[in-house]
Image (spheres, grey):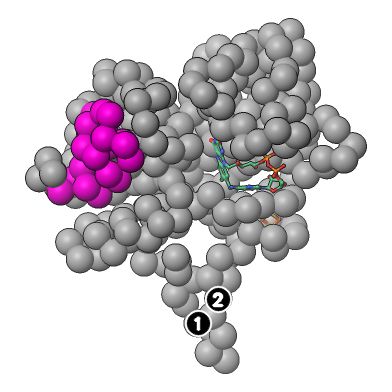
Amino acid sequence: MKKKITAPVLENKKIADGIYDMTLDVPEIAEQAGAGQFVSLFCGDRSRLLPRPISLCGIDAEKGTIRLVYRVTGKQTGTAQIAERKAGDTIEVMGPLGNGFPLEMAEGKKVFLIGGGIGIPPMLETARVLADKAQVESVLGWRDAETFLRAEFEPYGTVIAATEDGSVGTRGNVLDAIRENGLSADLIFACGPRPMLRALKEYAEKNSIPCYLSMEERMACGIGACLACVCETTEVDSHSHVKNRRVCKDGPVFEAGEVKL
Ligand code: FAD
Ligand code: FES
């Protein structure tokens, strides 16, 4: 069972409208963590006991730090409270949690790393670790010209951008960008909103491409104990009941054919 760690905040800065970039000094997590895993951040407010799941955007095992890039979802939310932390403050954190991407599958392959909106941060750590093992093609979708983290993907391979308003790259979503640029790959790793994951699952099935999706389901405990995060799978048990999986413990990364979206 993971325990809460009180981590010093090294940096917590705004990088785009409503998007923050936080670095924590937490060697216990940095040494064990892998791309696609997440941590639970506690808000430190008695009225907000449930932690907020945030993916690892960067892991530096040598320095003992982790980087988290997160969206403040509104005023008076837990994420708004987290954004108030300054360098020198501390925050309670638990992790690393979840399974992460099956990186070994990408070795020697051409892999699409697909991120939509706040699903982009975990793809950056994934791109970093795969850069010298695979041919990385990052296909990233934002709302508008505030294409946060985009330049940081560039050292790791080709970067294709899509924006909903057409201000940068292809107008539309990540699949529009794949089609417009005539791209193809041997493997897909992706994280983003459910409609994007659903469309990717369909695309991968149609083109017979192995595909792994990181799901951003609503969570409560974050450690497999409360079942708040279950998703339906395509498996049925011997009584013809659909089998459920916990996104926090069995995921957040699932093989696309395994889950209903
Ligand atoms: P509130 O409305 O105050 O939240 C109320 C409760 O609902 C909290 O317990 C909260 O954790 C839960 N909740 C609300 N929305 C979500 C959601 N979409 N997913 C999970 N729980 C939710 N966001 C980022 O900005 N960056 C990331 O890297 C990131 N990684 C994630 C990784 C995983 C595995 C999951 C499941 C979610 C991730 N999210 C990420 C989404 C993020 O957890 C929610 O935006 C956040 O919990 C909302 O909290 P809040 O305090 O702003 O909202
Ligand atoms: Fe409690 Fe997943 S959030 S079981």
Residue at figure coordinates x 20%, y 66% from the top left? 206
Tag 1, which secondary structure? strand
Residue 58: image x %, image y %? 48, 24
- Residue at the farthest top position: 88
Q: Which mark is residue 243?
A: 2
- Nearest to the observer: residue 4 or residue 49: 49
Q: Magenta stretch containing residue 164, yes or no?
A: yes
For residue 236, which numbered disc appears in the image? 1
Q: Residues within 10 Å of mark 2 (few under 14, many from 20)?
A: some
Q: Position of residue 163 (x, y in %)?
A: 31, 36
What kind of element bears circle 2?
strand
Question: Horizontally, is 182 left or right of 62 in the view?
Answer: left
Q: Amino acid at mark 1?
A: Val
The residue closer to the viewer here, 9 or 86, is: 86
Write down the region rendered in magenta: 159-179
Query: Can you name the residue that lies furthest to the right here?
Result: 46
Furthest residue to the bottom?
239
**Percent x, y for residue 104?**
33, 43
Q: Quadrant of the N terminus?
A: top right
Among numbered discs 2 and 1, the one appearing first in the sequence = 1
The residue located at (26%, 28%) in the rendering is 168
Above or below, 42 against 216 in this view is above
- Image quadrant of residue 23? top right
- The CA span between labels 2 and 1 is 5 Å
Whether residues under marks 2 and 1 lie with C-beta atoms below 8 angstroms apart, the answer is: yes
Residue 46 visible in the current orientation = yes
Q: Residue at x 45, y 69 (%)?
A: 260
- Left or right of 189 on screen, residue 25: right
> Disc number at residue 78?
none
Count of labels in the image: 2
